[in-house]
Amino acid sequence: MEKVIIFDTTLRDGEQSPGVALTTSDKLEIATQLVRLGVDVIEAGFPRTSPGDFDAVQTIARTVKGAQIAGLAHANPEAVDDCWNAVKAGEAPRIHVFLSSSDIHIMHQLVKDKETVLEMARSMVARAASYCSDVEFSPMDATRSDRAYVYWMLEQCIEAGARTINIPDTVGYTIPEEFAQFIVDIRNNVPNIDKARISVHCHNDLGLAVANSLAAVRAGARQIETCINGIGERAGNAALEEVAMAIKTRRDFFGVETKINTKELYRTSRLVSALTGMGVQPNKAIVGPNAFRHQSGIHQDGILKMRETYEIMDANDIGWPTGGAEIILGKVSGRHGFKARLEALGYDLTAEELSRAFLAFKELADKKAEIDDRDLEALVADKLRTTAEIYRLDFVQVTAGDHAAPTASVRVIAPDGSIHADAALGTGPVDAVYRAINRIIDVPNELTEFSVKSVTEGIDAQGEVTIRVESDGRSYVGRGADTDIIVASAKAYMNALNRLLSITRREDSDVRSNP
């Protein structure tokens, strides 16, 4: 069977999701897991955007083996040069050049004429090709562009050295049948298209990113650009797990294959969710919590008699722990059982991390009779997969009632180990907690989102709080979980502030080291 190249852009387009800001160590951890997953090409970032992103791409190129490392570049000399300097240490580096091709972008964003834009694309692809043999070119907003102009641009860029031609549906505008015909028309109207591989990059604004990508494969595309969990700009990108399992499950229809190790899909999904702070919706295909759960009596009856009656995929093939079934842990459970369950869920903890997690598990078990997989994932996300703690919440207490002003007392441990305590009044208990924390950690910010959900069912369920704060025009996500929702709220706020401080301090360091 012909092979379809899986090009993953979680670390570049995925990081463009509002509220997501990955550190270099976060990116390196995800890139290492993408290699285990079997991704062919990892787009590690956009080196020209910041010193921090350059460092992340360069670190991944130097460290990660087993996949091609690509960087994205504007069609200008400095961006192409920066991209090469970031990726050149990789085993098989790729420079991905992009430039808008649609009239609306050329007139209103680039403010240039079409001939100038064409020359920019051609010359920058040629510049990239002078550095490495693997160059990809994308005519941005191709699906809203004049077709003849796209054909002309592609022909010139292939002649200049592009060996992958990527067709982006940048704003998620196209429809599967229309997109498939576009790919066919490119094959028929670009004279030198045989010298390049056709790729597609589909956004999900109309919920069609995966459908459009698969339609393009049927039409002859042999590279698909994806993100784990379908994250990315606005409504996101084609979800890698959905593309991979569609091709695997319907090999009879597509007649192609990928080298994705599907048993790593669940683990990769959970890792990206934890590090980005973007949860996976329950009804998400392939990796959502409900993907292999059955509630209807008719469905349950069929599944018990023969799994294939209502499941077209085996949960084990996706890496779901124990075939997607849940396991119940309680306060009498031992360390070995706890460790085995976490490993089955895809968490590989150090001895120190395991000890911290086990203590937190025992504390939770004293408050909650039964602990299932969702509790464990919330516990690990809260205790281990957060931004490094700059400030640590040590104590929180709230007094509230219908005839009393909500009052909160908090105690925080600073980076130097000193202990700071303060108290504040608020309009409610959570507001009082946040005001008290702000009196200790003086970081200007605005709370823009606050959501609470129950991790599991029952009166003793953990509450999980997700918040967003804004500072200097940027959003930061914070998450916290506890059986006490006020404590969970305090943890979430501390998590967001620590992320804010971590990123701003890193950027300040970048500025000082790159004057």
Image (cartoon, helix red, strand yellow):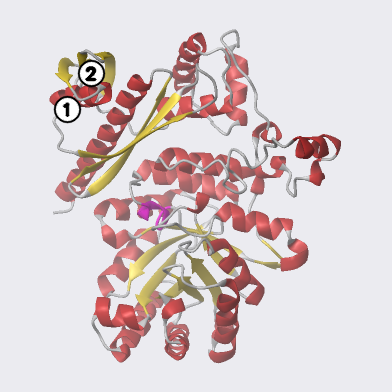
Quadrant of the rendering where the C terminus is positioned: bottom left
Q: Is residue 381 above or below residue 393?
A: below
Mark 2–mark 1 Cα distance, whole angstroms, equals 14 Å
Residue 59 in the figure: left or right of residue 470: right
Q: Is 226 covered by the magenta stretch?
A: no
Q: How many marks?
A: 2
Question: What's the mark number on residue 413?
Answer: 2
Q: Is residue 477 above or below residue 64?
A: above
- Tell me if residue 415 can be seen: no
Q: Residue at x 62, y 67 (%)?
A: 214
Q: Residue at x 25, y 70 (%)?
A: 78
Q: Residues within 10 Å of mark 1 (few under 14, many from 20)?
A: some
Closer-to-camera residue (263/59): 263
Q: Residue at x 22, y 18 (%)?
A: 412
Secondary structure category for the residue under label 2: strand
Quadrant of the rendering where the N terminus is positioned: bottom right
Residue 305: percent from left, percent from top: 86, 36
Which mark lies nearer to you, 2 or 1?
1
Q: Is residue 218 above or below residue 184?
A: above
Q: Return the residue at label 1.
A: 438
What amino acid is at disc 2?
A: Ile
Closer-to-camera residue (295/21): 295
**Residue extent of the magenta highlight:** 11-17
- Tell me if residue 296 can be seen: yes
Residue 397 in the figure: left or right of residue 133: left
